[in-house]
Image: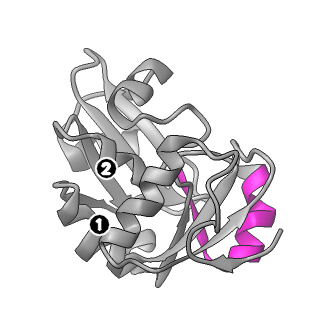
Amino acid sequence: MELVKGRPQNNEGRLEKEIRVYDFLDKLDISFERIDHEEANNMDACSRIDEVLGTIICKNLFLCNRQKTEFYLLMMPADKPFKTKDITGQIGCSRLSFADGEYMEKYLDIKPGAVSVMGLMNDTENNVRLLIDKPVIESETIGCHPCVSTSSLKIKTQDILHKFLPAVNHKVTIVDLPESF
């Protein structure tokens, strides 16, 4: 695995949704570093990638309410456990569960295992509410997938917050999840 600056030199063998991410980041003048790797669709696979990127790889959870009418993308540190009771009161929702992959593909154009903040560029009708745990907001950079689980990006957190999110017309709700005990 090699850390490189910017987009791949050619698009051969890459999915169109991945190329759209690079085009969008270039359009917004957001610089990034990239690493290509074997499929990484769980946090164990991401640990080595995390070392090479030298940044926090977020655990990205795609959640919904009981009625499956409200959807959430939660970005949190990989080492924190997730308990729905820790977040529901903070966002005004009585119960959350993991959303089905069909909704992830419908709203974010992402398959399970590749969930990423980059998918919000495909959510043009704002069906998904972004939630970010406080330590992620406070980090200088974050690692995320470019809508596929065979590459990972390192991007400045401030670029995500102040360039990317306004461009995709999404706001962030900062949550404060407890540390594990």
Residue at x 56% of width, y 75% of height: 6
The picture places residue 17, in percent across and down from the top left corner, at 48, 43
Question: Magenta segment range?
Answer: 45-60
* The disc label shown at residue 39, or none: none
Identify which residue is drawn at 68% across, 75% down.
53
Which quadrant does the N terminus fall into?
A: bottom right
Up-down relation of residue 30 to residue 151 (above or below): below
Residue 93 located left or right of residue 52: left
Q: In this view, does 46 lie to the left or right of 102?
A: right
Q: Decide which of 155, 7 is in the foreground and name it.
A: 7
Element marked by disc 2: helix
Q: Position of residue 111 (x, y in %)?
A: 54, 31
Which label number is shown at residue 121? 2
Query: In the image, 159: left or right of 54?
Result: left
What residue occupies the far bottom of the structure in this picture? 140
Q: Is residue 55 part of the magenta span, yes or no? A: yes
Q: Dot 2: few (<14), some (14–19), or many (≥20) neighbours within 10 Å?
A: many
Q: Can residue 177 be seen here?
A: yes
What amino acid is at disc 1? Answer: Phe
Give the quarter of the image for residue 84. Answer: top left
Q: Name the residue under label 1.
A: 164
Q: Which amino acid does label 2 sit on?
A: Met
Q: Earlier in the sequence, mark 2 or mark 1?
A: 2
Q: In which quarter of the image is the C terminus?
A: bottom right
Residue 76 is inside the magenta segment: no
Task: For the residues labelled 2 and 1, say whether their Cβ atoms are less than 8 Å apart.
Answer: yes
Mark 1 falls on what kind of element? helix
